[in-house]
């Protein structure tokens, strides 16, 4: 049995707490919001973000960050990406040397273009930092539906520790050393999912969705490989797998926000209606910044940015994508053919 604290009481943190508790671990959930902890104590479920998923009576709930961090075998950092740095700063005084922190949020910091595990390591240098990610909607994990994820860490020992703590007969965990690829896949797929939702909002069909998914993973892969990630990661669960589920699922808040925008709502209106953090909106500018920094063309992400932040009509964005210069799908294949 491990002592585990989940730092963040949203839908994903709550769902993972149920997985950890079902595996027999001692689980604590922390939130900075006293009203949220009060609701969880009274109802034993997150009635707004994860209704119907009951918390075991012996899961501890607290607003005391020191108590949540101290003496734990594993800290699961599950706050929205925009709060990762500030939460890590607040955790720092209580984190012991080599204490293991696993990030489960998905995003890229807009100002610095840093992935979340790098932010955590910068703010808590004494910790060991890892990531857990994959095609895993909280609504399904909380209900115990079969799910697969990947634990990424700098050492095999740390990755396998996370694997052992989380894995059970409905929550399968693989390991990987490619933390960069895992983080990029998880963050950038949210931006593509916004585009997929916009297409749904316009009433476009499966052909359009398939095009956005396949060309979207091409964009993500080009950038990730240029930054030093591995091809295998982008073709796996945290790349194409996570992209498929986020573009297609009814549970996807990014797809839902995109759909509302495609139906004519402004970005803020869409976010307000979704009522949860839409990570793709926060990652979109960062994705464009990485595209420019590494000189990697990302036309879908560029058009999403123009729709979100420059009020470009969605139909115009789709039209521009369709009328781009003629290209081969894989230019290197022609080059190899001609050799």
Image: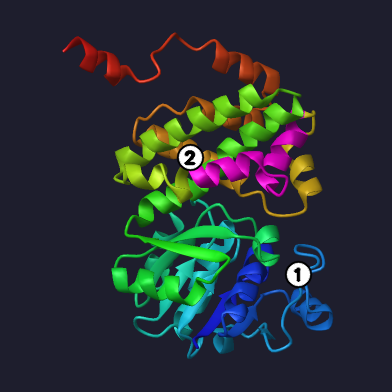
Instruction: Answer with mark 1 or mark 2, whichever residue precedes in sequence.
Output: 1
- Location of residue 262 with respect to 283 vertically, above or below: above
Q: Return the x and y of residue 260 as percentages of the image width and height.
A: 77, 36
Q: Which residue is mark 1?
A: 53
Residue 111 visible in image = no
Q: Quadrant of residue 257?
A: top right
Residue located 48% across and 41% down the image: 240
Q: Return the x and y of residue 192 as percentages of the image width and height.
A: 57, 36
Q: Return the x and y of residue 59 as percentages of the image width and height.
A: 67, 85
Disc 1 crowd rating (10 Å Cα; few below 14, some 14-19, many 20+) is many
Q: Which residue is at the front of the view, 171 or 114?
A: 171
Magenta stretch secondary structure, dominant: helix
Q: Residue furthest left?
A: 339
Residue stretch rendered in magenta on the structure? 240-262
- Location of residue 146 with respect to 251 vertically, above or below: below
Q: Quadrant of residue 176?
A: bottom left
Q: Which residue is mark 2?
A: 287
Q: Is residue 109 left or right of residue 45?
A: left
Residue 32 visible in image = yes
| Colouring used for the render | rainbow
Q: Which residue is at the front of the view, 118 or 151?
A: 151
Residue located 16% across and 13% down the image: 339
Asked which secondary structure carries label 1, the reply is loop
- Location of residue 284 with respect to 46 vertically, above or below: above
Q: Dots 1 and 2: beta carbons under 8 Å?
A: no
Disc 2 crowd rating (10 Å Cα; few below 14, some 14-19, many 20+) is many
Residue 265 numbered mark, or none: none
- Location of residue 86 with respect to 97 vertically, above or below: above
Q: Quadrant of residue 227?
A: top left
Q: CA distance from mark 1 to mark 2?
A: 34 Å
Of marks 1 and 2, the one in the foreground: 1
């Amino acid at each position: 049995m491990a002592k585990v604290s989940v730092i963040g009481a949203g839908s994903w943190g709550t769902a993972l707490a149920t997985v950890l508790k079902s595996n027999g671990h001692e689980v604590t959930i922390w939130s900075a919001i006293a009203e949220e902890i009060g609701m969880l104590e009274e109802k034993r479920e997150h009635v707004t973000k994860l209704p119907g998923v009951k918390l075991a009576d012996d899961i501890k709930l607290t607003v005391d960050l020191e108590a949540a961090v101290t003496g734990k075998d594993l800290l699961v950092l599950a706050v929205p990406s925009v709060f990762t740095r500030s939460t890590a700063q607040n955790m720092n005084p209580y984190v012991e040397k080599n204490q293991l922190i696993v990030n489960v949020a998905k995003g890229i910091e807009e100002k610095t273009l840093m992935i979340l595990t790098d932010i955590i390591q910068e703010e808590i240098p004494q910790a060991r930092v890892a990531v857990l990610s994959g095609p895993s909607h909280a609504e399904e994990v909380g209900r115990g539906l079969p799910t697969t994820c990947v634990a990424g860490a700098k050492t095999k020992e740390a990755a396998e520790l996370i694997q052992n703590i989380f894995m059970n007969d409905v929550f399968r965990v693989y390991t990987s050393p490619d933390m960069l690829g895992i983080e990029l896949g998880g963050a950038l797929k949210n931006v593509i999912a916004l585009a997929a939702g916009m297409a749904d909002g316009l009433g476009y069909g499966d052909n359009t969705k398939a095009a956005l998914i396949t060309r979207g993973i091409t964009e993500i892969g080009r950038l990730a490989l240029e930054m030093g990630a591995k091809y295998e990661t982008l073709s796996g669960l945290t790349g194409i797998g996570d992209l498929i589920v986020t573009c297609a699922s009814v549970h996807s808040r990014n797809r839902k926000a995109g759909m509302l925008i495609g139906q004519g709502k402004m970005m803020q209106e869409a976010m307000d209606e979704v009522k949860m953090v839409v990570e793709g909106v926060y990652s979109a500018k960062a994705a464009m910044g990485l595209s420019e920094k590494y000189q990697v063309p990302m036309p879908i992400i560029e058009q999403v940015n123009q729709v979100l932040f420059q009020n470009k009509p969605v139909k115009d964005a789709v039209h521009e994508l369709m009328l781009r210069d003629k290209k081969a799908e894989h230019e290197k294949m022609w080059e190899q053919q001609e050799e």
